[in-house]
Image: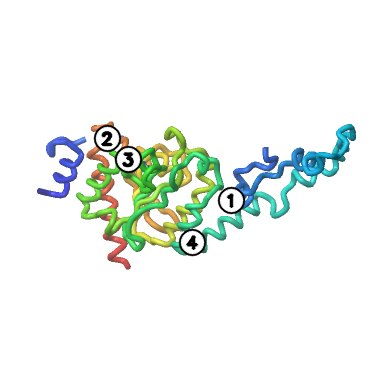
Amino acid sequence: MSRRAQFLEVLGIPTEWVPRTRVAAPAEAPPHVVAQPAAEPPAAVTAEPVAAAIAHPEAPPAVPAVPPAPERAAPALVPAGPAPGAAQAEREAAIATMDWPALEAAVAGCTACGLCQTRTNTVFGVGARQAEWMLVGEAPGENEDLQGEPFVGQAGKLLDNMLGALGLARGRNVFIANVLKCRPPGNRNPEADEVAQCEPFLRRQIALVRPRVIVVLGRFAAQSLLRTTTPIGKLRGTVHAYEGIPVVVTYHPAYLLRTLTDKARAWEDLCLAREVHDRAGAGA
Ligand code: URA
């Protein structure tokens, strides 16, 4: 059976068918700043008399606590350290030099955005770290959050079958990652701030893997990676670039599960990706 026939069978289509307040914004603070107990100016200021009263219960209750001088509160509101923009740049620079173990640890312990409060597991990515193919999805869903691995739900099964039709397998010769490493609650769309905090991790993963080709799955991942608002229909069929690496855009497998009409187009996209991959190999 031809690869195309095999692929269309995987997708469930007949082969003859031809064609989808901290005062400063916490988002800009580095993880260590966000993770630290936030400055609590009023509590910090009033804590001393309260703590003293608890520590010295014999102290005469009639003596009122001295109200804090307002100028004492102000320094507690302004954390020491670099300005938020500089801190973010510093964080990104640090991530950009990490090796695999450091990167994995940084993702596992990340508290740079609010998703750390609702996740069960971070989802780092899976596959061969020297793979020639890299796939990038949007963000973990419920199953991925529970298992800590990307694309393990229904969409993941379809993805594995699609990869199989190309002679690829997640454990062997492809690395799979997401733009976000934590699940947005209720599978809502990722927010710009979450993407901004997480993107350095993906950028570093791509730099470490150095694949010959990146296949981006779905509108959200494509628009985030390529920093564009162009619709996915217009991004398909062209070879883009991310940090000098060729990028091919295709539909998200979850979308393909729902949309028969675009399944054959996904195959055309993967054929393009294979062509790009082979060409990159020939020039290597
Ligand atoms: N959808 C994605 O984009 N990524 C996953 O890991 C799972 C579902």
Residue at x 39%, y 57% (from the top left corner): 245
Q: Residues within 10 Å of mark 4 (few under 14, many from 20)?
A: few
Residue topped by disc 4: 102
Task: Decide if residue 50 is on the left or right side of residue 231.
Answer: right
If you read the primary sequence from the N terminus, does the residue marked by circle 2 or circle 4 appear first? 4
On residue 251, the disc is: 3
| Quadrant in which the C terminus is drawn | bottom left
- Residue extending farthest to the bottom is 284
Asked if the residue at label 3 sits under 8 Å from ligand 1, the reply is no
- Residue extending farthest to the left is 1
- Residue 156 in which image quadrant: top left
Dot 2 amino acid type: Leu
What is the distance, in whole Å, between disc 2 and disc 3 at their CAs? 10 Å
Residue topped by disc 2: 257
Dot 3 amino acid type: Tyr
On residue 212, the disc is: none
What is the distance, in whole Å, between disc 2 and disc 4 at their CAs? 36 Å
On residue 31, the disc is: 1
What is the distance, in whole Å, between disc 1 and disc 2 at their CAs? 37 Å
Quadrant where ligand 1 appears: top left
Task: Decide if residue 252 is on the left or right side of residue 102.
Answer: left
Task: Decide if residue 4 is on the left or right side of residue 138.
Answer: left
Residue at x 43%, y 46% (from the top left corner): 121
Q: Residues within 10 Å of mark 1 (few under 14, many from 20)?
A: many
If you read the primary sequence from the N terminus, does the residue marked by circle 1 or circle 2 appear first? 1
Q: Residue 183, percent across and down? A: 44, 41
Dot 1 amino acid type: Pro
Q: Nearer the viewer, mark 2 or mark 4?
A: 4
